[in-house]
Amino acid sequence: MSENRSLRRVHVLTSHILRSPPPPPNVSLTRDVCLQYSPPELNESYGFEVKEMRKLLDGHNLEDRDWLYGLMMQSNLFSRKERGGKIFVSPDYNQTMEQQREISMRRIYYLLEKGVFHGWLTESGPEAELKKFALYEVCAIYDHSINSKIGVHFLLWGNAIKLFGTKRHHEKWLKDTEEYLVKGCFAMTELGHGSNVRGIETVTTYDSSTEEFVINTPCESAQKYWIGEAALNATHAIVISQLNVNGTSQGIHVFIAQIRDQDGNICPNVRIADCGHKIGLNGVDNGRIWFDNLRIPRENLLNSVADVSSDGQYVSSIKDPDQRFGAFLAPLTSGRVTIASIAIYSAKVGLAIAIRYSLSRRAFTVAANGPEVLLLDYPSHQRRLLPLLAKTYAMSFAINDMKMKYVKRTPETTKAIHVVSSGFKAVLTWHNMRTLQECREAVGGQGVKTENVVGHLKGEFDTNVFSLRERDLLERFTSEVSQLQDRGESKELSFLLNHQLSEELSKAFTEKAIMQTFLDAEAKQPAGSIKDVLGLVRSMYALVSLEEDPSMLRYGYLSRENVGDVRREVSKLCGELRPHALALVTSFGIPDAFLGPIAFNWVEANAWSSV
Ligand SMILES: CCCCCCCCCCCCC/C=C/C(=O)SCCNC(=O)CCNC(=O)[C@H](O)C(C)(C)COP(=O)(O)OP(=O)(O)OC[C@H]1O[C@@H](n2cnc3c(N)ncnc32)[C@H](O)[C@@H]1OP(=O)(O)O
Ligand SMILES: Cc1cc2nc3c(=O)[nH]c(=O)nc-3n(C[C@H](O)[C@H](O)[C@H](O)COP(=O)(O)OP(=O)(O)OC[C@H]3O[C@@H](n4cnc5c(N)ncnc54)[C@H](O)[C@@H]3O)c2cc1C
């Protein structure tokens, strides 16, 4: 780059940064005066109505959300602490595993007593399910252990009974589950098989002489493993097992087994061990379960998909074993939609903290005796956070659209919802992990401090060109697979050998779906400041998605020249989004108490007076 050109760039950069809002009149930043905290609200203005934008982002049940935020903020059970003149609520992760497990259960009983879970299983329909999603998302903003525990109890144990059970099961189990008179767990995974559900080894055999099912763990690899709530709390388990009737295996089926009595004693013919300390989610008591020919009544087969008559005849409404297997996996879809949604709320917490902090934290001057510069006035800092903010907006619209489709699902749409929600679960959780990592680093040392939330969240969470790209990758994938099959390879091996193309195709498909929902949400907006800002955010999402995808260059969807243009355009968009950063994160609608002290007066929060 010629010297003139580089000088010009330095000049542009400096003049841009020098536009950084000067410190408020009462604070000088020269060497001889201590730095004072200046809230971002003093220097930043809102270019749109944040309450309206929040309605767009949350999508539904705002009042229910605020009600639950309030319940948590008012109780000492949620580790309330005063820092820098504000109240914050966040779990104390310094507690032992045993303490975290105990306080998590007490928090759940508090929410139960306040009526938070009312209707979660005994009410049906889109409104009831959307309210459940909203309250679930608020729980996840506070702590993933709570949301895992209630997820397992309601979305897995409870949903399995709702989906696979029939009237007798609904009447016997749903209300007791909703009131925690029964504590459920979901025993699908085994030591030897997790992703591959078809391969699980627990076998349940029908004994027509006693009209009972006998559940057995034939070998060590068949022990149920990672089962949330099993180590200490669960009284009953959904057991996913191979079914054997008259010597014929009928594949995966779903049973109810009691594993503890009401006094918490483990039932005969059941063995339970603890999975032990984890890198996160230590409020969840994950356990391991062995069944030693445990006998359960015939009625404990959840028989909406298939049944066994008293004399041992197997009957099923779904003839195709593959489709029957797919039907048994349905509860996982609600989990995938939930996990994808809570990933985006987790990213929102990280970004709200990191962007607010970077609108008050200053570092280095760029002009002699000039003021230190706000972190978010550095183009490099904008580049780190604002593309992630745009992606979080895009994915908010996408997951809200998915939730609407899920609560209005029909037999005809379940397959598509399964496929898209699987893509969303992967892409949105990867986005969250990347966002939390970037946010943790963007706040410097403060990101390592547990009370500032953003660092710890990661450990807790760990578990148009768009259309062209998708269409072309699909054509490439099918052609590569066909060529291998023409050479005599099996379909399965041909797929495996093209795993990279299939991963690129899945990502392209999911990103196109996200882009489309963003465009739909934006199109519904009347002309005005919100529509204008959404246009900027959508452009940032589109361009940064293209820029980050190597297949764009690999397959020639973008030329080298285009790639340079895209990079320059993203940088330009960072500058255009910078003035809206505070309003965009305020629109998340997350109460201050659920963020971290560094999002506010981090000087006072660390003053000697607060020690
Ligand atoms: C998703 C996580 C659940 C969490 C839930 C609760 C939310 C709370 C959040 C916090 C909870 C934390 C606690 C964690 C709990 C757990 O981890 S529970 C256990 C979770 N386990 C899994 O997710 C197992 C993942 N594996 C599978 O789902 C299946 O094995 C598979 C990979 C999808 C199946 O693979 P395969 O054997 O190759 O069969 P396929 O050919 O893919 O499928 C056969 C047909 O069935 C259709 N199908 C599959 N799944 C579904 C579904 N969910 N809904 C509808 N249809 C489905 C599939 O499309 C096939 O049909 P065709 O396409 O017509 O051939
Ligand atoms: C905190 C926690 C709570 C849990 N709660 C429950 C619960 O309540 N109930 C329950 O049943 N389970 C629960 N699980 C288990 C969870 O569902 C499994 O861990 C998950 O399904 C993955 O199975 P796995 O661990 O056996 O990994 P594996 O299936 O062995 O996979 C290991 C790795 O290989 C990859 N992989 C697998 N198959 C393929 C393939 N064909 N091609 C390419 N890559 C592949 C996977 O993506 C993964 O990265 C929990 C797990 C954790 C960590």
Image (cartoon, rainbow, N blue to C red):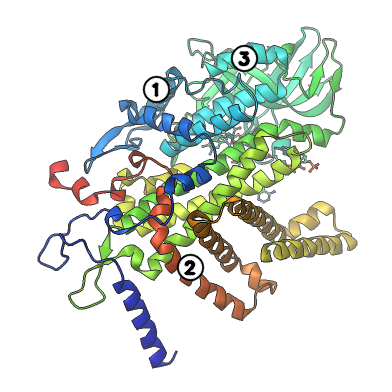
How far is disc 2 from disc 1 in space, using C-alphas?
47 Å
| Mark 3 element type | helix
- Circle 3 packing at 10 Å, graded few (<14), some (14-19), many (20+), is some
| The quarter of the displayed image where residue 129 is located | top right
Residue at image coords 52%, 72%: 569
Label 1 neighbour load within 10 Å: few <14, some 14-19, many 20+: some
Is tag 2's residue or tag 1's residue first in the polypeptide sequence? 1
Amino acid carrying label 1: it is: Arg
Task: Residue type at mark 2: give it.
Answer: Leu
Cβ atoms under marks 1 and 3 closer than 8 Å:
no
Tag in front: 2 or 3: 2
Q: Is residue 387 left or right of residue 550?
A: left
Q: In the rendered view, tell whether residue 455 sits above or below residue 248.
A: below
Q: Are marks 2 and 1 in contact (CB under 8 Å)?
A: no
Residue 504 x, y percent position in the rendering:
67, 60
The answer to whether residue 289 shows anywhere in this view is: no
Residue at the image position 39 percent from the left and 83 percent from the top: 9
Q: Position of residue 256 (x, y in %)?
A: 66, 18
- Of badges 2 and 1, nearer the viewer stands 2
Which of disc 3 and disc 1 is earlier in sequence?
Answer: 1
- The residue that appears at 35% across and 28% down in the rendered structure is 99
The residue beneath circle 2 is 573
Residue position marked by numbered label 1 in the rendering: 106
In the drawing, what numbered circle is on residue 173? 3
